[in-house]
């Protein structure tokens, strides 16, 4: 592995460069005034004018400029001028020629300094551009990551606007979308702009967003106040310069991403347009994914409702027909055992065995009905039904309890059903997999939401870092819980570690069903 430079390496390099410049400058100055007579006479005669000495002064100037930049080069050049002038004015036998040579060397040195400085500036600009490009790419990757990891438009598109603002140094921004009919346009997502603008609606072709969404091409407006199709409310909000790009996926235009400056003129470059166009494509993918996901959730909700209706129908038929027939059969067998004429002992034993079998079957059917659709959920509500679930778990040898906090109330039927199914699945996992000895169900009623937590002291498992990884890990039961929570706009959190037990918490926004009557099992 390559050894990294120590923290003070730049300071050490600067010190070495400084002393190199000083040494070369001193040596050149000494040579300029006290050149030893070491060369052949013919050469010494050629060098008597000290032109070569003066040319050698370019060396420390070059080194100083490379090492310390423009200021270092100019300071070194000043030192060289001070070093050369005394010989040119008072020592040289040809002062005029010496001054001309000195001026020529100074001019060439200054030219060298400017060339080196220009190269350094160009290199710095390239590095800055590369760093800027890297930052842009990182932010674009962040947009892509947000889109692939989040299906809620409110979270994704708000983040998209913030990143677009940062990359273009804009004052604010927004995303305009079509309404459901595709006729009018509004800005449901705004950042650093008045929220009142979100209430404004306008038709196709109106405003910058309308133009972009009609043509499918980017639009730059230098002064929105003089823009012919300006929306009055946006002009009054102080919008000055605007750049807008279409939000597209494939050939379909979903909306427009707009970035603005307020109360100042800003020049949006072609680079800004290119960046925003890329972000607009990503936002289009996000919108399309979210809408597909919404449709999938709608279909899932419809399927779930159909399943629950079918469960209710089967449970009702089992209760009204199968259970009643089993009860009637049990009573007939009981009447046979009490006939006036005594039955043979073998027949009595067979009748007792049949009655026991019918009782076991009846109990199993009732448990099956409870699992399909407990009647208490419709008649008594969520709390009473969960009391029954924890009681069943206690009957199976696991000590279970239920705690309720907050103002207990009835919820909408779908809300109670979702919470019941999640707790039912969680307690089923406790029974089958956890090897727990204790379990606790907690219900917390908040004014606008309900939170239910199921905890156990079992063996636990390695919970995935992201809930969306549940499918890949084979946790289909937990996946079903998560989808049920999402159907109501709620959240599901799973916390578990090996030998540390498991806690599953679901929280959903709720609306009271208007019933003040709450019944719990004693």
Image: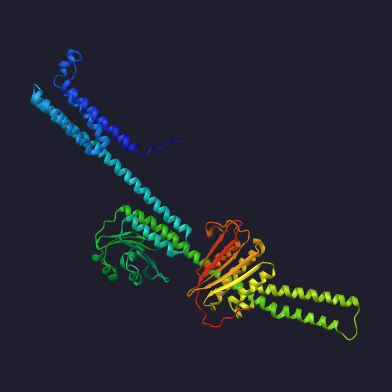
Q: Quadrant of residue 187?
A: bottom left
Residue 496 visible (yes or no): yes
Left-right relation of 267 to 46: right
| Quadrant showing the C terminus | bottom right
The residue positioned 21% from the left and 27% from the top of the image is: 26
Q: Nearer the viewer, residue 181 or 29?
A: 29
Q: Nearer the viewer, residue 287 or 182?
A: 287
Q: Nearer the viewer, residue 39 or 12?
A: 12
Q: Quadrant of residue 153?
A: bottom left
The residue positioned 17% from the left and 13% from the top of the image is: 41
- Colour scheme of the rendered structure: rainbow
Q: Quadrant of residue 165?
A: bottom left
In the image as oriented, which residue stretches furthest toward the top? 41
Q: Against 379, is 221 above or below?
A: above
* Number of disc labels: 0
The location of residue 351, given as percent across then percent down, is 84, 77
The residue positioned 17% from the left and 26% from the top of the image is: 54
In the image as oriented, which residue stretches furthest toward the bottom? 340
Left-right relation of 87 to 235: left
The location of residue 115, given as percent across then percent down, is 23, 36
The location of residue 39, given as percent across then percent down, is 20, 15
Residue 52 visible (yes or no): no
The residue positioned 44% from the left and 55% from the top of the image is: 144
The location of residue 191, given as percent across then percent down, is 35, 64
């Amino acid at each position: 592995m390559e050894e990294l430079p120590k923290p003070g390496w730049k300071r050490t390099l600067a010190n070495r460069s400084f002393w190199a410049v000083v040494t070369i400058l001193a040596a050149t100055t000494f040579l300029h005034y006290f050149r030893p007579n070491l060369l052949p006479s013919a050469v010494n005669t050629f060098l008597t004018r000290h032109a070569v000495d003066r040319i050698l002064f370019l060396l420390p100037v070059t080194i100083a400029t490379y090492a310390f930049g423009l200021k270092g080069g100019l300071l070194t050049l000043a030192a060289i001028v001070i070093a050369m002038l005394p010989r040119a004015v008072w020592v040289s036998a040809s002062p005029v020629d010496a001054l001309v040579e000195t001026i020529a060397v100074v001019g060439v040195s200054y030219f060298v300094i400017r060339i080196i400085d220009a190269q350094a500036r160009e290199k710095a600009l390239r590095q800055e551009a590369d760093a800027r490009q890297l930052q842009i790419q990182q932010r674009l990757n962040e947009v892509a990551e947000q889109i692939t990891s989040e299906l809620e438009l409110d979270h994704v598109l708000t983040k998209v606007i913030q990143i677009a603002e940062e990359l273009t140094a804009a004052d604010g921004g927004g995303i305009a979308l079509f309404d459901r009919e595709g006729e009018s346009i509004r800005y449901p997502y705004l950042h650093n702009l008045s929220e009142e603008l979100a209430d404004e609606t306008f038709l196709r072709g109106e405003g910058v967003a309308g133009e972009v969404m009609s043509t499918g091409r980017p639009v730059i407006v230098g002064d929105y106040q003089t823009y012919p199709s300006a929306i009055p409310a946006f002009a009054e909000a102080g919008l000055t310069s605007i750049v807008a790009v279409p939000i597209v996926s494939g050939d379909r235009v979903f909306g427009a991403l707009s970035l603005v400056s307020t109360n100042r003129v800003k020049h949006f470059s072609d680079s800004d347009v290119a960046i925003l166009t890329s972000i607009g494509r990503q936002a289009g993918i996000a919108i399309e994914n979210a809408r597909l996901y919404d449709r999938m959730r709608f279909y899932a909700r419809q399927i779930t409702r159909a399943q629950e209706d079918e469960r209710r129908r089967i449970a009702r038929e089992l209760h009204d027909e199968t259970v009643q027939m089993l009860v009637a059969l049990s009573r007939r067998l009981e009447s046979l055992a009490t006939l006036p004429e005594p039955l043979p002992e073998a027949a009595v034993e067979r009748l007792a065995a049949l009655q026991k079998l019918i009782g076991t079957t009846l109990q199993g059917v009732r448990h099956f009905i409870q699992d399909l659709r407990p009647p208490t959920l419709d008649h008594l509500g969520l709390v009473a039904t969960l009391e029954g679930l924890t009681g069943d778990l206690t009957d199976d040898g696991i000590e279970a309890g239920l705690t309720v906090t907050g103002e207990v109330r009835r919820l909408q039927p779908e809300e109670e059903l979702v919470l019941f199914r999640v707790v039912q699945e969680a307690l089923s996992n406790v029974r089958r997999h956890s090897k727990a000895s204790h379990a606790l169900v907690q219900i917390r009623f908040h004014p606008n939401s309900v939170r239910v937590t199921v905890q156990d002291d079992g063996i636990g498992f390695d919970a995935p870092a992201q809930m969306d990884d549940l499918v890949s890990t084979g946790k289909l039961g937990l996946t079903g819980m998560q989808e049920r929570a999402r159907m109501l706009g709620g959240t599901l959190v799973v916390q578990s570690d090996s030998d540390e037990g498991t806690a599953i918490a679901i929280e959903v926004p709720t609306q009271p069903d208007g019933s003040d009557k709450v019944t719990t099992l004693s």
